[in-house]
Image (cartoon, helix red, strand yellow):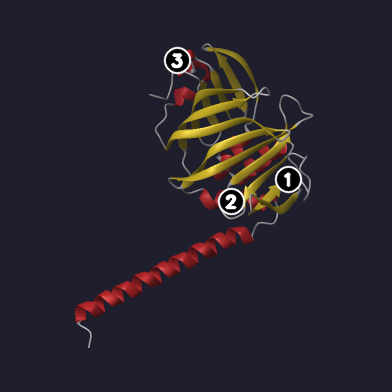
Amino acid sequence: MLPKARITRLYLTMTIRRCLVLTTVCLLFTLGAYAEGVHNAESLIQAMHARYEKTWYKTLTFTQKSTTYNADGTTKVETWYEAASLPGKLRIDVGEPSKGNGALMIDGTGYFFKDGKQVGTRPYLNLLLVLGFDVYGQPPQKTLDELKGEKIDITKFHEDTWQGEPAYVVGAEKGDLKSKQFWVEKKRLLFARLIQPDDRDPAKLEEITFSDYRPLVGGMIAARVEVHSEGKLVFSEEYSEISANPKLDPAIFDPQQFATHHWEK
């Protein structure tokens, strides 16, 4: 007959195992439920939002190594400092922040600065901000409206494979790699790829990819971004010193205070 203490340990071990199994089953069921209900752009955006809406971070800062790959084989490396207040607000300081070079992207408007002075402003919606971050925190209908405003045909939807993993595609029929479109990982419902006309030359195609995803509190962040033009790597971003939910002064997102208020230490 087993000692009472050993029986108690065995009982606790079996109970813990059963709990772990049940937790795993519930998690798999939940993930499967999200994927099972996705059959068009609307249900995809709703599923992305539902997956992370309660846990995704609200503010974000990181240091970015920005590399430009020139046609002559040379490269230019800069350090950028970025801060976001989600949804809708992004600040980029290019180089030493005290020099006042960079941009603000605030709710669909871009403000551009050089030497501490505002040198331009125009309507500008950053699709990478929308698809990589805002989608998880703002109402799905707002995201859908923004996508339509950016001329992505949300009536076109199919499933495909990206880097060996299943993916959803919005904006193009299967086999079409020229229409403006975005790709989302099926398993984790994370943004993976954007194909669109190049800003500088609409006759060329630009492809932007998010990779090296890492857990960040209750969300995720892609620590590497690549930009390809006509199949050639022209720009990359590598993130470090990533901080989720830092307390940010609203003044850093005010165009009138861009030169006088900074977040980085």
Q: How far apart are marks 1 and 2 (CA)?
A: 17 Å
Asked whether the residues under the numbered discs 1 and 3 touch, taking CB atoms below 8 Å apart as contact, a structural biologist would say no
Q: Is residue 243 rendered to the left or right of residue 112?
A: left
Is the C terminus in the top left, top right, bottom left or bottom right quadrant? Answer: top left
| Residue corresponding to mark 3 | 98
Label 3 crowd (10 A; few <14 / some 14-19 / many >=20):
some
| Residue corresponding to mark 1 | 154
- N-terminal of the pair, mark 3 or mark 2, is 3
Residue 118, relative to residue 33: is it above or below? above
Residue for point 30% across, 77% down: 11
Q: What residue type is labelled 2?
A: Leu
Label 1 crowd (10 A; few <14 / some 14-19 / many >=20):
some
Q: Which of marks 1 and 2 is in front?
A: 2
Q: Quadrant of residue 139?
A: top right
Q: Is mark 2 on a helix, strand or loop?
A: loop
Q: Position of residue 62 (x, y in %)?
A: 46, 32
Is the N terminus in the top left, top right, bottom left or bottom right quadrant? Answer: bottom left
Asked whether the residues under the numbered discs 1 and 2 touch, taking CB atoms below 8 Å apart as contact, a structural biologist would say no
Q: What residue type is labelled 1?
A: Ile
- N-terminal of the pair, mark 1 or mark 3, is 3
| Residue corresponding to mark 2 | 189
Q: Position of residue 138 (x, y in %)?
A: 56, 42
- N-terminal of the pair, mark 1 or mark 2, is 1
Q: Where is residue 147 in the image (x, y as percent from the top left)?
A: 68, 39
Residue 2 seen from this side: yes
Q: How far apart are marks 3 and 2 (CA)?
A: 38 Å
